[in-house]
């Protein structure tokens, strides 16, 4: 058999082809191993959910989900803390109450900034997903005598949204890191009926004075018309007597109207769109018409 002669160029080409194939195979194998490695640097940079610790969650809400929030009304709130994946120690739980609502926690101490201290003794939550439910917190209106002049804004309060903030301070038992988490409760708060009645008294005084000073007739039944200019003592006494009578009649009528607003929503003969101080002023301005309408409804029933 004749020997096969290989030229130098052919041998060099075979060596280059073998080297290139080996290099490509090694790079492909290395890339597959990097993709399969669960703790690779690439995974740490991208922030894989499997490596992130679930945070501690805190929620606050009314004990009765259908409860309506109104000024000068008791409120019951429940606070719940749910542990994440790390064992923790809850150091404290506090509740921030909207200052405009003038509420104080029953049986709970408060800080200098007005926050209520809900939990003072540390509690450990070592199991992932462990739940801690705080006993319902009752918030009661502060007494009017305690509020003094700061209670005036409560009378002119208009419907708006308020925010309760529950905060939990906890310590991670693994690394000793101290952290804080907050939970918010946004509610719609209605004004107090006392504010509407205060507005009705203001409107009543203004309306009665306006009618008497600028030509309101107080004796149309006998066909006479008395001037409102106070020129003598007798006229002055009569003027103030009529003013007091109008205010008294209007105060009773507006009180009945506001009571009806609180007990039923279907009052076709009295319509006030806004049940606050300014709606009360409007009701007081037309107190005579309100009194006449209520009187006719009572007599016709």
Image (spheres, rainbow, N blue to C red):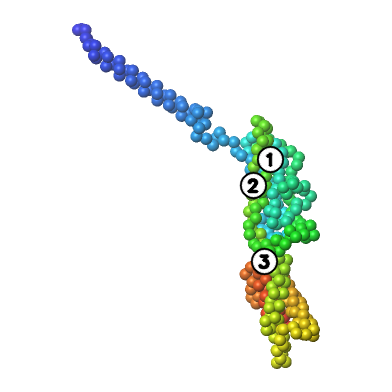
Q: Which mark is residue 183?
A: 2
| Mark 3 residue crowding within 10 angstroms, few (<14) / some (14–19) / many (20+) | many
Residue at position x 73%, y 76% from top?
250
Pointers 1 and 2 in contact (CB under 8 A)?
Answer: no
Q: Which of the 4 quarters of the picture holds residue 93?
A: top right
**CA–CA distance between discs 1 and 2?**
12 Å
Q: Is residue 258 visible?
A: no
**CA–CA distance between discs 2 and 3?**
30 Å
Q: Which residue is mark 1?
A: 169
Mark 2 vs mark 3: which is more N-terminal? 2
Q: Quadrant of the C terminus?
A: bottom right
Q: Which of the 4 quarters of the picture holds residue 1?
A: top left
Q: Which residue is mark 3?
A: 276
**Residue at the extreme front:** 231
**CA–CA distance between discs 1 and 3?**
39 Å
**Residue at the extreme bottom:** 223
């Amino acid at each position: 058999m004749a020997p096969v002669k290989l030229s130098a160029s052919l041998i060099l080409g075979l060596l280059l082809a073998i080297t290139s194939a080996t290099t490509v195979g090694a790079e492909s194998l290395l890339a597959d191993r990097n993709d399969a490695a669960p703790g690779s640097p690439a995974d740490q940079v991208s922030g894989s959910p499997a490596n992130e610790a679930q945070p501690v969650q805190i929620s606050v809400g009314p004990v009765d989900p259908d409860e309506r929030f109104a000024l000068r009304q008791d409120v019951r709130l429940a606070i719940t803390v749910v542990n994440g994946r790390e064992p923790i120690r809850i150091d404290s739980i506090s509740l921030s109450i909207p200052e405009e609502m003038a509420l104080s926690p029953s049986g709970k101490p408060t800080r200098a900034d007005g926050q209520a201290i809900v939990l003072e003794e540390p509690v450990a939550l070592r199991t992932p997903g462990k739940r801690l439910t705080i006993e319902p917190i009752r918030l009661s209106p502060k007494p009017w005598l305690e509020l003094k002049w700061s209670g005036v804004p409560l009378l002119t309060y208009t419907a708006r949204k308020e925010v309760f903030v529950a905060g939990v301070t906890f310590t991670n038992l693994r690394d000793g890191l101290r952290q804080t988490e907050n939970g918010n409760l946004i509610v719609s708060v209605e004004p107090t009926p006392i504010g509407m009645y205060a507005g009705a008294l203001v409107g009543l005084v203004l309306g009665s004075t306006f009618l008497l000073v600028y030509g309101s007739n107080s004796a149309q039944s006998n066909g006479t018309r008395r001037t409102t200019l106070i020129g003598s003592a007798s006229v002055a006494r009569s003027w103030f007597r009529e003013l007091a009578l109008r205010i008294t009649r209007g105060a009773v009528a507006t009180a009945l109207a506001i009571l009806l607003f609180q007990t039923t929503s279907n009052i076709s003969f009295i319509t006030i769109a806004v049940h606050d101080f300014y709606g009360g002023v409007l009701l007081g301005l037309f107190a005579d018409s309100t009194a006449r309408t209520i009187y006719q409804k009572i007599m016709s029933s």
